[in-house]
Amino acid sequence: MSSGAEIRLARLFDGGSNSVVVAIDHGLYNGPRPGFNDLPRAVGSLGTADAILVSPGMAPHVRDVFARRGAPAMMVRLNWGTQYATQWNYHESRSVPVLSAAEAVALGADIVLVGMSIMTGSEAVDAENVEVVARAVSQKRVAGVPIVGEVYPAGHEDLPPDERHEQIAIGCRIVAELGVDLVKTFYTGERFAEIVAATPVPVLALGSRKLPRERDALELAAAATRAGARGVVFGRNVLQARDPGRFLLALRAVVKDGIAPAEAAVRNGIPEAIPA
């Protein structure tokens, strides 16, 4: 890893603590949705995040949140995949690059992210998806920026838990072998610690669907970090919370300070039983 990438990565894990990343790039593949339609306004409540994941085209629209000392790191997505466009029920999980690591750095990126799906049912598609990751890793080395490999199993919504865990475990090791500096993936339950142990780079757990209660999301974050995750990447569970800024403070308490979810919720005024 270059010195530039090391410096940028150290900022994400300030002082060695776990990291809280907020993803706001959902419009890139899902279009408009509640909480994400007015991103320049939404990011105003996300200033306590360690990083914010954005799509390339939205980076200029939300730049104000990054343009200050102590601001969150900007994380920019480098590719687009049909697996993310869940509203269209695609099945091939094809991935294409949308910009290079150097172009992302020119936008202001401190970190870049590339997604990968394998076991799509097509050896050719799997190979193409791996190639997208490999090219992004090569580019990030030249740009001097750390890269996150997002492991997103093909058909993950319908996979049995054991099969889903196995796909994620294999995918995390593959992207690490390809040279990513971090991994972002789904928390798989009781065996998630096995994935963390077999992945030689830090693992961040993603939030996926909006959970029924805000405290459910805090419990997910706590379970993932107890299993060894170095942080979380939450999107809908933050932006669609009743008070995103307050929820983010509770999430930080759980992930970075090890506060029990119930205590973090009470401290930040998050109701226990009211659906989010």
Image (spheres, rainbow, N blue to C red):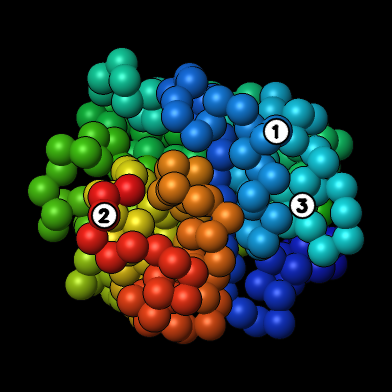
Q: Look at 69% across and 66% down and name the residue there.
A: 12
Residue 145 in the image: x percent, y percent?
Answer: 76, 53
Q: How many marks?
A: 3
Residue 71: quarter of image: bottom right
Kind of element beneath mark 1: helix
| Amino acid at the residue labelled 2 | Ile
Residue 34 in the image: x percent, y percent?
Answer: 45, 29
Residue 104 in the image: x percent, y percent?
Answer: 76, 37
Left/right placement of residue 54 relative to residue 121 reads right
Q: Look at 82% across and 41% down and name the residue there.
A: 64
Residue 246 in the image: x percent, y percent?
Answer: 54, 60
Kind of element beneath mark 3: loop
- Name the residue tied to disc 2: 274
Q: Look at 37% across and 34% down and name the residue there.
A: 126
| Amino acid at the residue labelled 1 | Pro
Q: Nearer the viewer, residue 148 or 216?
A: 216
Left/right placement of residue 238 relative to residue 135 reads left
- Name the residue tied to disc 3: 110
Kind of element beneath mark 2: loop
- Name the residue tied to disc 1: 40
Q: Look at 80% across and 48% down and name the residue there.
A: 66
Q: Is residue 136 visible?
A: no
- The image quadrant where one finds the N terminus is bottom right
